[in-house]
Amino acid sequence: MVQACNTWMCGAAMALNITASLFSAFTGSAEDVCRPFDGACSANDHQLMFGNMTGLRMQPLEPKGRIIVFGARGGDDKSPGQEHRGDTIPICNSVIELGWECVPVFYTDEMAGKIKTFAQGADGYISRVNPDHYEGVTTSKYEELLLELIDMGLAPMAHPQLMKRFGAKDALAKIAPLRTGLPDTYAYYDAEAWRANFPSSLSQGPRVVKQNRGSQGEGIWICRLKNESLYRQMERLPLTTELVLMEAVDNHVEHMTLGDFIAFAEQYLEGGMEEGGQLIDQAFMPRIVEGEIRVLFVGGKPIEIVHKKPKEGGLSATLKSGAVYTRYEPDAPEFERLMKSFVHRDLGNLLPLLGMEGHELPLLWTADFILGAAKPPWVDGKDYYFIGELNCNCVGITTQLEVTEVVAAEAVRICEAGRERKKRGVLKMLW
């Protein structure tokens, strides 16, 4: 049974002084229980916070709980003419179908105070704000709001610190001990360490250098020596050594000396650790030409496997570079070994290695794997997979909307687990 505006929404609306006529834009008739509201909330405020909610289902009359889904206007993750991401309203609707209230809310710095008021009494939030530059959005202020909501008792999906540690490229160095981790991985946070070690690591074979910022292969460089006979001939290469470089974003090739590349890449260290400045240096795995394997997860459950095959002659597995994507079920026999290695053996150690033990896994996330040679002591001639990237920052499922039902069920489970933790008084310890 549903009604046009439930108690929580009405209470939030009263706190925000949102008029019945404005609220009816997404909750139904203003003649129902939402009236009367005398207020000075402008149409602009309402539009800033909620936007166009066409397609949102009616809310339950007696909701089991309440979840807010955060987004932000602009960015490159919206379809033309659409305010919300293509998967935002469907996620909300799947939560509503489980008997929970769920409303999408746009974050802006200007509306942070009103959003905090609106969130009173909610059980959890889902963050769907993609790392990007949005007008009126300061990332640090958005994270501050999320931390305030966590202090109010909302279950985080996900915690800002988890999103940072999970998505940062240095996660690859931290998880190197995993069975699917790559041991030959270095993380650099300052120019001195980068200059000191890279000439030595490159002397042993081709490398992949990854910046922490950017996406779709931007700032990911495959580094080779022009004269490959120089590999493993010396402990440290001279800065005059000529390199052949390929950027994964579009497979274009550049030529620099080692010294010039080291100086060029120092731009990725600007701002230091506080602003995400870091470089990752890994051994190049030649089998990248066979593609990357992306596994989509909802919490700890694998949902889909995607084989991303680079176009002929290329190394990048992005759509922009012309890669071909083939989808598989998570129990596909082709990837049984990968699932056993990562899901059954590594997954339980993932968050502890990232320093986030006790937290829930992200609501929606991906892990990318590359085929490589077996590492000791597991040398048996079989295929081995190594993690190339983790991502939990607003993973899109617009082309897989059937997944929203699983996402909703996991979000409800996390919120209910949060209620139990609060009853036991262990909320602060875990969040």
Image (cartoon, helix red, strand yellow):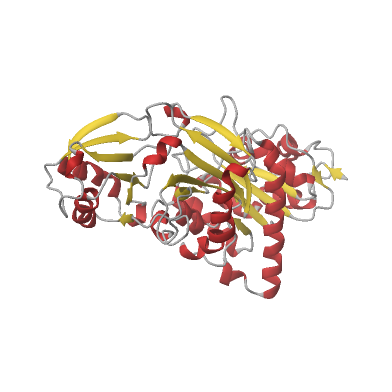
Image coordinates of residue 188 in percent, x first then y, are 29, 55
Q: Residue at x 55, y 59 (%)?
A: 347
Image coordinates of residue 225 in percent, x first then y, are 21, 40
Q: Residue at x 39, y 37 (%)?
A: 217
Q: Residue at x 33, y 49 (%)?
A: 283
Looking at the image, which is closer to me, 105 or 366?
A: 366
Residue 35 appears anywhere in the view: no
Q: Looking at the rendering, which quadrant does residue 371 occupy?
A: top left
Q: Quadrant of the N terminus?
A: top right
Q: Looking at the rendering, which quadrant does residue 36 occupy?
A: top right
Q: Residue at x 42, y 53 (%)?
A: 374
Looking at the image, which is closer to me, 68 or 250?
A: 250
Q: How many marks?
A: 0
Image coordinates of residue 128 in percent, x first then y, are 57, 44
Q: Is residue 358 left or right of residue 407?
A: left
Residue 137 appears anywhere in the view: yes
